[in-house]
Image (cartoon, grey):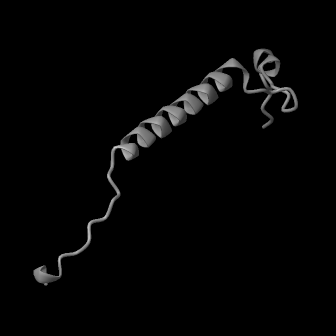
Amino acid sequence: MTASLHPALTMLALDDNKVTPGVLGFIVFAVLGIGTWWILKAMNRSLGRVNFVEEPEDPAAK
């Protein structure tokens, strides 16, 4: 038994060489970029508040 394609389905066939991400792909990529920038900015701000100065150990505490 051979399956014949409906004429509407043959019109929907896409050429693999002409498929592009389009506007939706750009929007998703832009949102990912903005989200990454926002997370890095928030992390930098949070790490800026941390005091990394180490106090010497008290030898009498041992």
The percent position of residue 49, horizontal first and vertical second, equals: 34, 44
Q: Is residue 34 left or right of residue 1?
A: left
* The N terminus, quarter of image: top right
Instruction: Report which quarter residue 11 is drawn in.
Output: top right
Instruction: Give me the residue at 77% from left, 15% from top.
Output: 8
Q: Is residue 16 left or right of residue 26?
A: right
**Closer-to-camera residue (36/21):** 36
Q: Is residue 37 left or right of residue 50?
A: right
Q: Is residue 39 left or right of residue 52?
A: right
Instruction: Report which quarter residue 21 is drawn in.
Output: top right
The percent position of residue 5, horizontal first and vertical second, equals: 79, 25
The percent position of residue 9, horizontal first and vertical second, equals: 76, 20
Instruction: Give me the residue at 84% from left, 32% from top.
Output: 16
Instruction: Give me the residue at 86% from left, 26% from top.
Output: 18
**Closer-to-camera residue (52/11):** 52
Instruction: Give me the residue at 33% from left, 59% from top.
Output: 53
* The C terminus, quarter of image: bottom left
